Image (cartoon, coloured by chain):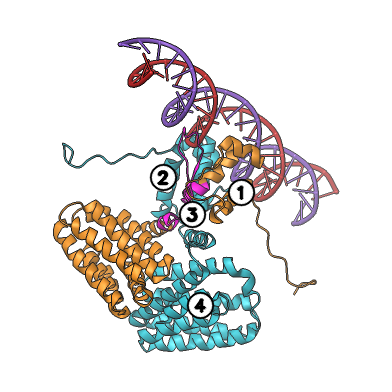
Chain colours: A cyan, B orange, C purple, D red
DNA sequence: CCAGGTGACTGGTCAGACCAGTTGATTTCC
DNA sequence: GGAAATCAACTGGTCTGACCAGTCACCTGG
């Protein structure tokens, strides 16, 4: 050990735009700048931070790519704060998949794990209000069932969000959503080939009802299994043979 | 439905720097630009893409913030390609936690799920070579045990990587690593307070040995439980009371 | 009272300049 | 001849100032 105690850590050169981005990011994640609020205009930021406009712009690009802000040309109110979302996760997961570091099968398997455990935890920790929200979304799905796929998917997502909230772990839901979006981004074209949307929606409603019952009954293992099975049924035909084996292993 | 079939989707304005970033990102994730290779200098990119230098720089900032490239001033070889890594995931998870969208407890619970399922899958799909690599890392950990915390942690990480590879799902391991790094980033100061590093390392070695045995025996449930328990034991004292309840629920 | 024009903003882009750091070849000194 | 100092040609990082195309508030003429 060097004299004087712990050795010095290497210092990283910090560039001006990083400081600016960090400063703004801190205010966003700490809630000082809530979603919906506006940043000062670029030229105003320039004078506040005492840097050049390109520096400010590079910082804003970084924040924008992380999904924290959105800028629209001509908006006199300035850059809009979006707050923290699953956007960054989605982007990162999508990259991982597109680069074949992770296959579509792994993505789906990952979501099987996520949804399964989410259901399991929800079955342990559910509150009456959670169950109500889930039932509500199932009712909406049934209403929309024969047609209206887009609204149906939305209700589906809200159901899963309710489960995630009941589980007490927002991360599980957020991640599952990000994975879902990444999967959609990768096999978009194949999804369009789903033959009978009406029949699928009907089965989906039945499945969600079973999940709700398991959660209501406090049957964690059953709810987890149902969640995994539903994903397996849906995706088994959309992935390759090798990936299908992965999915089978994840069924448990 | 509008005449002519499906209705038009809203178009999103695509900015020049986005096109540039996308173009480069595609070459990286598709492997045309492998990790370690170099991008042309900024001024060269300017002439190749036919845009201004600030546009190129904004694109590079986006890629850099995603962990795909790294630039060093004065490097005559140009911007270095890093390839796809868990870096982006780490950053996104860290943001989620710092913004209190997700608590530290959720993060740890999330990792309990991840590690547990990773172990379970590894127990199902393990190969002899995987087991060897795991044993190797345990031996290294034992060697380093009383002192050398840094190298110990590295061997630890390599063990988990071996498990992740055995599980057949790189995403689980990548995500667990990202969560781990995010946790470290959030409760760094508390970790330094761990009283007796030597004793901890000893217990850690014993734990890893048990996990390896469970995986070798094909005992998925046991391996999953061990993984979750180890994290619980380590973090239970480092999180608040509310979070501790979460972690208990995740023990299963 | 309302339609349409207009001007003062916004962010997006570009060109050009300078600085500081890195590197490798060149020169200088022993 | 070989090692050390020097220098020139890069690199990326930053700043300035300019222009464009949107957007919106306001004002004016019907």
Distance in Å between CA atoms under marks 2 and 4? 46 Å
Disc 1 and disc 2 in contact, CB within 8 angstroms:
no
Foreground pick, B26 / A42: B26
**Relative to D20, residue A63 above or below:** below
Disc 2 or disc 4, which is closer to the eye?
Answer: 4
Q: Earlier in the sequence, mark 2 or mark 3?
A: 2
Marks 1 and 4: same chain? yes
Q: Chain of mark 3?
A: A
Disc 4 or disc 3, which is closer to the eye?
Answer: 4
Which element is circle 3 on? Answer: loop
Give the residue number, with chain letter if any, for mark 3: A68
Disc 3 and disc 1 in contact, CB within 8 angstroms:
no
Give the residue number, with chain letter if any, for mark 4: A244
Q: Chain of mark 4?
A: A
Give the residue number, with chain letter if any, for mark 1: A75
Give the residue number, with chain letter if any, for mark 2: A23
**Relative to A115, residue D22 above or below:** above
Range drawn in magenta: B62-91
Distance in Å between CA atoms under marks 1 and 4? 48 Å
């Amino acid at each position: 050990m060097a004299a004087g105690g712990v050795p010095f850590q290497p210092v990283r050169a910090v560039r001006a735009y990083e400081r600016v981005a960090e400063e703004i990011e801190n205010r966003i994640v700490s809630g000082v700048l809530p979603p919906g609020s506006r940043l000062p205009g670029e030229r105003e930021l320039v004078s506040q931070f005492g840097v050049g406009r390109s520096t400010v712009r590079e910082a804003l690009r970084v924040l924008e790519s992380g999904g924290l802000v959105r800028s629209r040309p001509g908006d006199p109110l300035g850059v809009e704060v979006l707050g923290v979302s699953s956007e960054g996760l989605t982007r990162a997961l999508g990259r991982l998949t597109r680069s074949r570091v992770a296959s579509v099968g792994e993505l789906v398997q990952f979501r099987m794990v996520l949804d399964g455990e989410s259901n399991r935890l929800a079955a342990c920790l559910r509150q009456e209000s959670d169950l109500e929200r889930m039932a509500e979304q199932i009712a909406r799905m049934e209403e929309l069932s024969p047609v209206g796929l887009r609204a149906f998917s939305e209700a589906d997502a809200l159901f899963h969000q309710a489960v995630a909230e009941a589980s007490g772990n927002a991360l599980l839901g957020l991640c599952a959503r990000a994975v879902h979006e990444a999967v959609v981004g990768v096999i978009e074209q194949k999804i369009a080939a789903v033959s009978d949307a009406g029949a699928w929606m009907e089965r989906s409603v039945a499945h969600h009802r079973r999940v709700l019952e398991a959660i209501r009954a406090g049957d964690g293992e059953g709810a987890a299994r149902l969640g995994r099975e539903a994903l397996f049924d849906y995706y088994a035909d959309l992935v390759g043979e090798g990936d299908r084996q992965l999915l089978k292993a994840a069924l448990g």
